Image: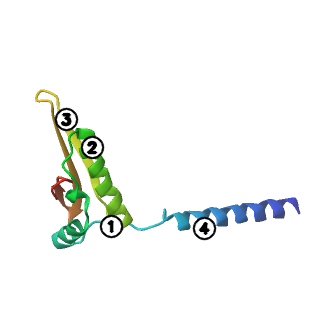
Amino acid sequence: MKRFSWLLASLVVLCLVTVTLAGCGLMRQYRDFSSFEELTDWLQANDVSEKPISDYASQWYSKALEVQEDALNDGYIVSAAYYYDSPTDTYIVYCIAIIDGDIWYWDPETD
């Protein structure tokens, strides 16, 4: 009887975890944009680029992360990235999406 109770308790815990994860959206399927038009339509609807231009690289990168989060909420895969060139003390922040194996990138402040 003890084994049956242990097995039953394990099954209940597994079911609760599965229901919890499903409710959190962690089991959602994400995908790349299917076309350039789909990406541009999505960017037109996204309002991050309408916010004031950032004064600092950290604010600029925060906008890229916001675009990434908005994309995930809509089921798309977008990466946020930055590059720092130390000789020129220059930062570049950009978002990346893959469409049919091609890499597309854009500035989150200007789409």
Give the x, y percent position of residue 88: 10, 29
Q: Residue at x 36, y 67 (%)?
A: 75
For marks 2 and 4 on the same chain, the one whose residue lies earlier in the sequence: 4
Q: Are marks 1 and 3 in contact (CB under 8 Å)?
A: no
Mark 1, mark 3: which one is toward the viewer?
Answer: 3
Q: Secondary structure at mark 3?
A: strand
Q: Tag 3: residue type?
A: Tyr
Q: CA distance from mark 3 to mark 2?
A: 15 Å
Residue at image mark 3: 84
Q: Is residue 54 above or below residue 6?
A: above
Q: Tag 2: residue type?
A: Gln
Q: Are marks 1 and 4 in contact (CB under 8 Å)?
A: no
User: In the image, which disc is placed on residue 18?
Assistant: none
Dot 4: few (<14), some (14–19), or many (≥20) neighbours within 10 Å?
A: few
Give the x, y percent position of residue 76: 32, 65
Q: Secondary structure at mark 1?
A: loop
Residue at image mark 1: 31
Residue at image mark 2: 59
Specify the farthest residue to the top: 87
Specify the farthest residue to the front: 52
For marks 1 and 4 on the same chain, the one whose residue lies earlier in the sequence: 4
Q: Are marks 2 and 1 in contact (CB under 8 Å)?
A: no
Mark 2, mark 4: which one is toward the viewer?
Answer: 2
